[in-house]
Image (cartoon, rainbow, N blue to C red):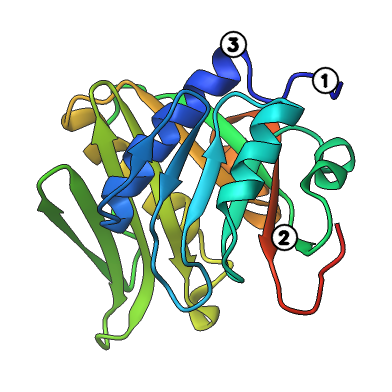
Amino acid sequence: MCGPAATGDVGVHLDEWVRCWVLARGAGGAVRTPHWWRVPTGTATERSRWVLTTASRAAVRAAVAEATAETDHVKTAGDPAAWLPELGPGWRPEPPTWLMTTTLTAAPAPPVPAGYRVETGTSSRTSVVTVTADDGTLAARGYTAGVEDFATFDRIVTEPGHQRRGLGSFVMTHLAAVARDGGARRGVLVASAQGRALYTTLGWESRSPITGAHRCADGGAA
């Protein structure tokens, strides 16, 4: 049997992340089962997403049996080398990502970088921080959504013409202050390789690699 992929704290953190991520994306109709979340994302590239919070060969096989559409996605914590073969044929691996967590410290939002202005908008339990240049063009943006005492951070983007100016760090730090003010004490997210490098410098800790794959018509390569 493969080594445990989503046990103990990792499974708990994945559960927290999905609960917040659904809010951040406005994805209605999510279903929680004993072993995974099924989220009907309904985008052009992803019909639904299965996120396994407890992973075993049996759980993976059961999720794969449900995820029958060409663009269905399956994600679980653990080493891709161990878990991708468990998906069977017809699955294409996704770029590597990592589950990360942090403690949200009580700190004020940072000052706005020179030449930019920031706007924060909140709806229900989701907030968006938008940074625009003085000429009105979008420079950076990010979202946070919280459930109970934890929050996720999502879609952190800096536009190409504004990169390498510290705006990614600014958005993350500003979002952390917003989340903390809203009652969150812990942060959880799933990061790309580029995001992981940034978040590590901000004190986030990697908990586990995430194995992700989606069905594809040409058979894929698992």
- Say above or below: 129 vs 138: above
Q: Which mark is residue 94?
A: 2
Which residue is tagged 1?
A: 3
In space, the residues marked 3 and 1 are separated at their CA atoms by 13 Å
Instruction: Check disc 2 and give the amino acid type.
Output: Glu
Q: Nearer the N terminus, badge 3 or badge 1?
A: 1
Residue 109 shows up from this direction = no
SS for dot 2: loop
Q: Nearer the viewer, residue 67 or 168?
A: 67
How many numbered dots are placed on residues in this image? 3
In the image, is 182 to the left or to the right of 106? left
Q: Nearer the N terminus, badge 1 or badge 2?
A: 1
Q: Quadrant of residue 99?
A: top right
- Say above or below: 100 vs 194: above
Quarter of the N terminus within the rendering? top right
Q: Nearer the viewer, residue 129 or 40?
A: 40
In the image, is 28 to the left or to the right of 212? left
| Residue at point 82%, 43% (across, down) | 80
In the image, is 77 to the left or to the right of 109? right
Circle nearer the viewer, 1 or 2 = 1
In space, the residues marked 1 and 2 are separated at their CA atoms by 21 Å
In the image, is 37 to the left or to the right of 100? left
Q: Nearer the viewer, residue 165 or 45?
A: 45
SS for dot 3: helix
Residue 128 position, x and y percent, is 24, 57
Which residue is tagged 3?
A: 8
Q: Are there few (<14), some (14-19), or many (20+) residues within 10 Å of tag 3? A: few
Residue 48 position, x and y percent, is 47, 59
Instruction: Check disc 3 and give the amino acid type.
Output: Gly
